[in-house]
Image (cartoon, rainbow, N blue to C red):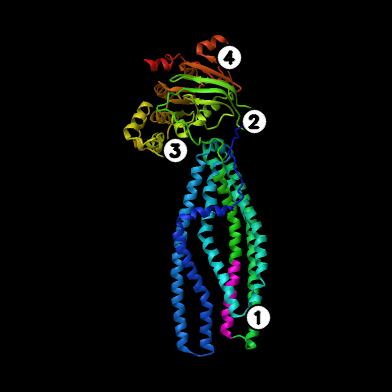
């Protein structure tokens, strides 16, 4: 059994991607039905127009009936007013429905993406995903707001026009229909090429968006290495690829519309020539010829429009396929269908039983037959060379990835049998680089209390968490206090301040297990002391796994576990491991990952017992 880094995605086969939108339209069938009625009435007015023109012309040129001419003209005004009202209602209902459908679809895609495991995001650029949410769904939105309406309108006009042509003059109808197979064939040929070209444009736009997003996220690195010009050059090169693909698509579209337009209106010329002969022979009145020509133009325009809509449909297929592929992406880490209950509060007993793990089938094992127990309230430090598997173990506990062999348990229950709500609600994580959102300090601390875990935290709880994390002192010095906006990724705060807010989150969450990726390795001495004090308060009485980089943390732990190449090679107390003169002692004495610091107080488990 292997755990791929990303998620598994199935190619869409049947039904067609745009057909998958139909269930989303079902809740709005009432509005769509009214819009359809308005569409039929408006199309009926359009089909009646040539017949009224026929009466108007015959009244003027053959019967010389002024009163009839006035009545026909007035009737036309009334019909066009009715058509205008029907068009307004139809467009409003369809557009408003489309906005709601696309908004729901965009929300569903986002909700699905944020539930995929981190492995999926290691293979996809953030900008590419945001492009799916914006550009691809915008294509679908514009398509739905016009395509459904126009495909229905032009179909009605085509069928109705053909019927009226047949009733007006059967011989001329045959001439008119002669061009239809040619137009349909051209639409099929060009439509396929247009779909491929449009997919290529969307791929290049997503790639350019991904590069821009990455550059913005790493703006300090870009500027510190003075790479602004190089990043701009790379982005410009990607945009040039977009332009090349878009120009190629434009050539196909231009050729498509030019060919279809020539064929369609060439047929109108043929009808005009043949109809003129019939008028000269007295077999057709001028009014009948004009009405026939109007119907022929209506049919030709409908065929041309349908061909154009077919091209738009092909363009949208690429966008729809990619959107629904995201929705159909299967997570490699799935929640149990019938999760086992976890007692609350959890005891915090963690066990890794013969755990093996690899990030992808082609990669070597990151962990191999690891056995590790963390008792309730025990503090365990995990040390070892870079790449030994420390962070991997920390990522397996909340099921960011699933083990490929063995199992991980929480309070004796395989974590794969627990709901994400219970499992991740029982684990608090303080990363080495805390992730803050661009909102206020209050919002960032309160982020630890999701809605499914209960009501939003009260102000007193947020303040208490900040105080426990030794963050209240700097928050109160800020001009806006808890309402201070921290900027994207917390850039307006220092490293120590960000770490204390991350610790305040965990205090508010109050988990049974804490996973701590040593949070002081990159801080100045003053900030380090404040964070160390906050962590010492946080870890009391909680089961804790610390990824240790500094000796102070190792000495604080009840037990030290040494990893090397994905295996546990040593474990014991700090002094026991030094006496064994193994890997831990060699790292310590060589100053590898550890820096000597004065001894700290006795282990936190002892403090918790006091």
The main secondary structure of the magenta stretch is helix
Q: Quadrant location of the N terminus?
A: top right
Point out the frontmost of discs 2 and 4: 2
Point out the frontmost of discs 1 and 4: 1
The disc, 3 or 2, on the residue closer to the chain's N-terminal end is 2
Query: Which residue is the site of mark 4?
Result: 586
Residue nearest the viewer, comparing 200 with 438:
200
Q: x, y (%) of residue 528?
A: 44, 23
Query: Which residue is the site of mark 1?
Result: 273
Q: Quadrant location of the C terminus?
A: top left
What label does residue 437 carry, if any? 3
Q: x, y (%) of residue 538?
A: 40, 24
Q: Quadrant of residue 30?
A: bottom left
Q: Secondary structure at mark 4?
A: helix
Q: Is residue 290 magenta?
A: yes
What label does residue 363 carry, if any? 2
Q: Are marks 1 and 3 in contact (CB under 8 Å)?
A: no
Q: Is residue 152 visible?
A: yes
The disc, 3 or 4, on the residue closer to the chain's N-terminal end is 3
Q: x, y (%) of residue 306?
A: 59, 65
The disc, 2 or 1, on the residue closer to the chain's N-terminal end is 1
Q: Which residues are magenta?
A: 285-304
**Dot 1 alpha-carbon crowd within 10 angstroms: few under 14, some 14 to 19, many 20 or more:** few
The disc, 1 or 3, on the residue closer to the chain's N-terminal end is 1
Q: x, y (%) of residue 148?
A: 53, 61
């Amino acid at each position: 059994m292997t755990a791929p880094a990303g998620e598994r995605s199935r190619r869409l086969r049947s039904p067609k991607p745009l057909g998958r939108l139909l269930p989303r339209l079902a809740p709005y069938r009432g509005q769509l039905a009214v819009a359809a009625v308005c569409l039929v009435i408006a199309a009926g007015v359009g089909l009646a127009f040539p017949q009224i023109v026929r009466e108007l012309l015959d009244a003027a040129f053959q019967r010389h009936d002024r009163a009839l001419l006035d009545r026909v003209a007035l009737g036309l005004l009334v019909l066009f007013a009715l058509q205008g009202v029907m068009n307004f209602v139809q467009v409003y209902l369809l557009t408003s429905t489309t906005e709601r459908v696309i908004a729901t679809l965009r929300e569903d895609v986002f909700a699905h993406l944020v539930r995929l495991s981190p492995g999926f995001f290691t293979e996809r650029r953030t900008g590419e995903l945001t492009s799916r949410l914006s550009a691809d769904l915008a294509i679908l939105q514009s398509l739905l707001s016009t395509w459904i309406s126009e495909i229905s309108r032009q179909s009605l006009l085509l069928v109705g026009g053909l019927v009226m042509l047949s009733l007006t003059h059967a011989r001329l109808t045959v001439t008119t229909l002669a061009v239809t197979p040619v137009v349909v064939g051209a639409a099929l040929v060009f439509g396929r090429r247009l779909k491929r070209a449009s997919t290529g444009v969307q791929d290049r736009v997503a790639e350019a968006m991904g590069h821009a997003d990455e550059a913005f996220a790493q703006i300090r690195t870009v500027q510190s290495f003075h790479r602004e010009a190089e990043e701009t050059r790379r982005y410009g090169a990607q945009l040039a690829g977009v332009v090349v693909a878009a120009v190629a698509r434009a050539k196909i579209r231009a050729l498509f519309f030019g060919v279809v337009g020539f064929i369609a209106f060439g047929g109108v010329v043929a009808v005009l020539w043949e109809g003129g002969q019939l008028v000269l022979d007295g077999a057709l009145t001028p009014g009948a010829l004009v009405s026939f020509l109007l119907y022929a133009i209506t049919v030709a325009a409908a065929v041309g429009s349908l061909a154009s809509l077919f091209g738009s449909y092909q363009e949208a297929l690429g966008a729809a396929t990619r959107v629904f592929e995201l929705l159909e992406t299967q997570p490699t880490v799935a929640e149990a269908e019938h999760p086992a209950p976890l007692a609350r509060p959890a005891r915090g007993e963690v066990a890794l039983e013969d755990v093996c793990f690899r990030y992808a089938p082609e990669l070597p094992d990151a962990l191999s037959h690891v056995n590790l127990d963390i008792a309730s309230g025990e503090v365990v430090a995990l040390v070892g060379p870079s790449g030994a598997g420390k962070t991997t173990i920390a990522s397996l506990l909340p099921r960011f990835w699933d083990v490929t062999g063995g199992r991980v348990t929480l309070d004796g229950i395989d974590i794969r049998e627990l709901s994400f709500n219970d499992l991740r609600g029982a684990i608090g994580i303080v990363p080495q680089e805390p992730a803050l959102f661009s909102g206020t300090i209050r919002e960032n601390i309160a982020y630890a209390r999701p809605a499914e875990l209960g009501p939003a935290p009260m102000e007193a709880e947020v303040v208490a968490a900040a105080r426990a994390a030794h963050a209240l002192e700097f928050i109160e010095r800020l001009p806006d206090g808890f309402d201070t906006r921290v900027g994207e990724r917390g850039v307006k705060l220092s490293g120590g301040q960000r770490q204390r807010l991350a610790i305040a989150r965990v205090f508010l969450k109050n988990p049974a297990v804490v996973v701590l990726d040593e949070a002081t390795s990159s801080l100045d001495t003053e900030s380090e002391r404040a964070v160390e004090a906050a962590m010492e308060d946080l870890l009391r009485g909680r089961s804790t796994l610390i990824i240790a980089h500094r000796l102070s943390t190792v000495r604080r732990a009840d037990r030290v576990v040494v990893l090397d190449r994905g295996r546990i090679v040593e474990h014991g107390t700090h002094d026991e491991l030094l006496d064994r003169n193994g890997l831990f002692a060699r790292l310590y004495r060589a100053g590898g990952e550890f820096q000597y610091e004065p001894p700290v107080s006795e282990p936190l488990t002892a403090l918790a017992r006091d």
